[in-house]
Image (tube, grey):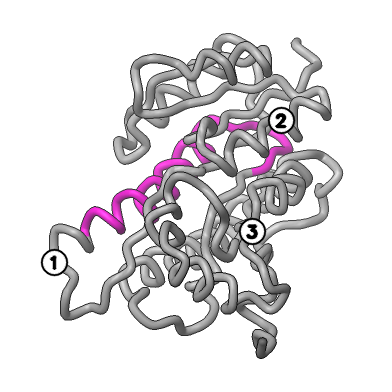
Amino acid sequence: MNDTPTVLLIGGAGAIGAASARQLRARGTHLVLAGRRAAPPEALVTELGAEYLQVDATDAEAVEAAAAQVVERHGRLDGIANFAGSILLKPAHLTRPDDFNDVIAQNLLTAFNVVRAAGKLMRGAGSVVLMSSAAARIGLPNHEAIAAAKAGVIGLTRSAAATYAARALRFNAVAPGLVRSPMSSRITSTPQGEEASRAMHAVGRLGEPSDVAPLIAWLLSADSGWVTGEVFGADGGLASVRARNG
């Protein structure tokens, strides 16, 4: 049996995913990155000594097949994190049904598919980390679709934690504030957008992927073995602390 912990990162080449991968690699974890693109992110894969699998996380069978491939290759699967997702900021009356369905698919369906695969294939102690959002914990204008999807992730996390606790399979969620990434750049691409976003966070700045990654790496490790069913805010105080004035 391979003694090296092995973790599957869905969307692991994204901003938070890559930062988390680096944290995990520093802990000695073997990494399998998965994403929609056929071509692997060569520089990241080489840096981390990782493997890459092409996976559409909205496809339940594809996610299950990826997890099964990891188990077959390494004889174990110690953790899965789902970084697949999207952002849509529109009021409900301006959100088209197709846009809403896409937000649900990218954020909630992908998370459910990861839970499903973990329940089928992970044996013994293990950890699953899902990505929620501060928008699911506090009312923010124009966030109806993404807040609904990310609130669903919280409910999914807690139910799965209860279902699989007897198998020592743990489920936790991380709920970031606005983190700098290619995905969030449309929000912060103007000085006005940058300032408005910064002002929402009590610490007075946007998040960086490195602000969130250590928490995710800890949750995927055995060090957090007594933690399950929790939602961790890594949000600069957005969901719990009133932003400062000026």
Few, some or many residues within 10 Å of mark 1 (<14, 14–19, 20+):
few
Image position, residue 125 (x, y; %): 73, 38
All told, the count of numbered labels is: 3
Give amino acid for label 3. Answer: Gly
Few, some or many residues within 10 Å of mark 2 (<14, 14–19, 20+):
many
Q: Which sits earlier in the primary sequence, circle 1 or circle 3?
A: 1
Image position, residue 165 (x, y; %): 67, 53
Q: Per the image, is 237 magenta? A: no
- Say whether marks 2 and 3 touch (CB < 8 Å): no
**Label 3: which secondary element:** loop
**Label 1: which secondary element:** loop
Few, some or many residues within 10 Å of mark 3 (<14, 14–19, 20+):
many
The mark closer to the camera, 2 or 3, is: 3
Q: Which quadrant of the figure contains the N terminus?
A: top right
Is 190 situated left or right of 157 in this image?
left
Is 38 situated left or right of 227 in this image?
left
What residue sits right under mark 2 in the picture?
Answer: 22
Q: Which sits earlier in the primary sequence, circle 2 or circle 1?
A: 2
What residue sits right under mark 1 in the picture?
Answer: 96
Q: Residue at x 58, y 21 (%)?
A: 32
Give amino acid for label 1. Answer: Arg
Image position, residue 68 (x, y; %): 48, 21
What residue sits right under mark 3 in the picture?
Answer: 207
Is 11 rendered above or below residue 106? Answer: above
The mark closer to the camera, 1 or 3, is: 3
Q: 28 or 128: which is nearer to us?
A: 28
